Image (tube, rainbow, N blue to C red):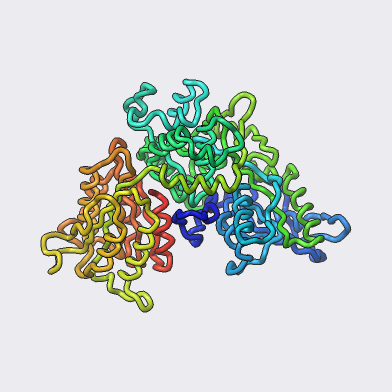
Amino acid sequence: MAVAPSSGNRQWLPYTAAVTAGLVVIAGAFLLVRGQDQDPGRPRADCTVTLEVNSSTEKAALVAGLAERYNSADRTLDGGGCARVHVTALTSGKATEVLAAGWTGTGLPRPQVWLPTSSLWTGQLRLLDQAAGRPPQTPDRYPSIANSPLVIAMPKPKADLIRQRGALGWGEILGLSGREGWAGFGKPEWGRFTFGKDNPNLSTSGLAATIATYYAAVQRASDLTRADLADPKVTQFVRRIEANVSHYSDDVVDLLRDHAEADLAGGGASTDDLSAVVMQEELVHLYNEGELSPKGDGEQRGRKPNVPLVAIHPKEGTFNLDHPYVVLPTADERQRAAADDFLTFLTDKDQQAAFADLGFRDHERRAPDELLASVGTEPTGGLTYFDPPDPGVVDAMLDGWGTLRKKANILIALDTSGSMEAAIGNRTRFQVASAAAAKGLALLNPEDRVGLWSFSSETSQRPDGPYREEVRLGDFDRKKVTSRIANLHVEGSTALYATVRAAHRQLLDRYDPDRINAVVVLTDGKNEYTRDNDLARLLADVALDPERPVKVFCIAFDRDSDLATLDRIAKASSGKAFDATDPAMIDEAFVKLVSSF
């Protein structure tokens, strides 16, 4: 979850989905402390002070490695003695939630130091504390241990063309191309201009991108107000930018990994409809260094992409993810001394070099030459940074974003084959799936257009074909869709390919260029329909048309699901497959899915 619950009526995505909140986990060897000659050695055994540190997930392995180095160093605290630092990890959103709830239910030691991705989180925790009538845990502004500004990342040929126009702003890059697309830049063969961003309800970078858009709209770098949010010129500006979103991501790293795989397979040719992605600068560096590319056996990193990404900095300025170092009220006097010493250690040049190796700027926002060489130069005179808005303004912004975001046409295809009768505890697979679907429907925008199909194979209930329209694609009637799901009959085998093909064709026939157009498939099995079992033809049929992108999103439900094939189908359309092969994860999978719309 990105921010605190509003006092209004906004439907908030469950905090249990916070596995994707903040900057996502970037697994792999590059999270280790690389490029350093120092040997951590053995930790000292005579230290009586323990300092518990909880870090956001994207830098947790790095901070843990640096803590090991600290524990092995010959350091003495003010007043004598030494400390041992222990690091745990939670996403920033989850940590905000549990700090507000008294740090219960995590199974992790309560921290004295918190390292979220952004000071946005300290503001949201302050809101939660105020709402509960207790003293704030995060009343201050805090020093940074690293920084990563938000950028518009584009493939180099497109970035080079954009830069020929000189300094451009958020609206000029992301909001003015629209249907004219790249023809306005003399490249009609590049098609429409669309971009990707994370859903701000799940992601720190997605939230930062939304804040940056509002600041660009008011043409200021500070003091964003509630009155600004209600200004029709501001809402029109934001709506124009959101209209060019291809689809919202729950995990920009997954998007970049798919892009890297397609780059290497196609010799650099793009297979998706994205002209740009709004994300943190750090990830541009990791992508260009091959850290997000497929890795071979024994390789620590993949091949560098054929076409690198370039970071573009809009002329109005950008938002910075400041990675604050927060000492919490739970720290006693000796732990505060240890926290001060660990902060000094983290901001020393050797440790800052480890952050730089992952693409971060240093604690004073300075970019190493190697980073700029990897991601592209910044404007003469440096970057302009937007100040974090008041937490209450952020909350109100997200209340309003639901009405400004791009709307969707969503056709849901729900597997009703006989295997859905299999038991999961004291319920059937179908009961678990339909309950998760109902929760997911509650998170959709009321202005979305939604249809429902059921599919299995020809049965006595469905003699004319393997799929049936249960609710016609149209204005979203949540009660009608939920009721129809609850009354579906389970029987037959799984006609997966025929259903995906037909659903995709229907959305092409009813394509709306002003909406995200998507097929959502929920299945517990693999294709068992002999009349249509040609996967290669299906992949060709659903292959993305950048001019009319219809994307397929799949949830592989239960271990009998053919996740590998569903992933191929989704990737062919530039969609995504979500792994709920452990049925306990299906609610989380639906939250991730809904964040795409």
Q: Residue furthest left?
A: 464
Image position of 429 with respect to 480: above or below: below
- Residue at image x 78%, y 60%? 335
**Residue 306 shows up from this direction:** no
**In the visual, does 405 lie left or right of 354?**
left
133 or 585, which is in the foreground? 133
Above-or-below relation of 206 to 451: above
Residue in the image at 38% along x and 29% along y: 177
> Closest to the observer: 597 or 569?
597
- State the count of labels: 0
Residue at (59, 52) in percent of width and height: 124
Expressed as whole percent of the image width and height from the top left, the position of residue 341 reads: 79, 52
Q: Judge whether residue 405 can be spotted in this image.
A: yes
Q: Quadrant of residue 459?
A: bottom left
Taking 187 as reference, is 488 above or below it?
below
Q: Is residue 151 left or right of residue 509?
A: right
Q: Quadrant of residue 48?
A: bottom right
Name the spot of residue 369 as percent of width and height, x first: 64, 32
Vertical comparison of 215 with 457: above or below: above
Q: Percent x, y for residue 62?
A: 64, 52
Camera-side residue of 332 and 459 = 332
| Image spot of residue 528 (x, y percent) | 22, 63
Q: Is residue 308 left or right of residue 480?
A: right
Outermost residue to the bottom: 426
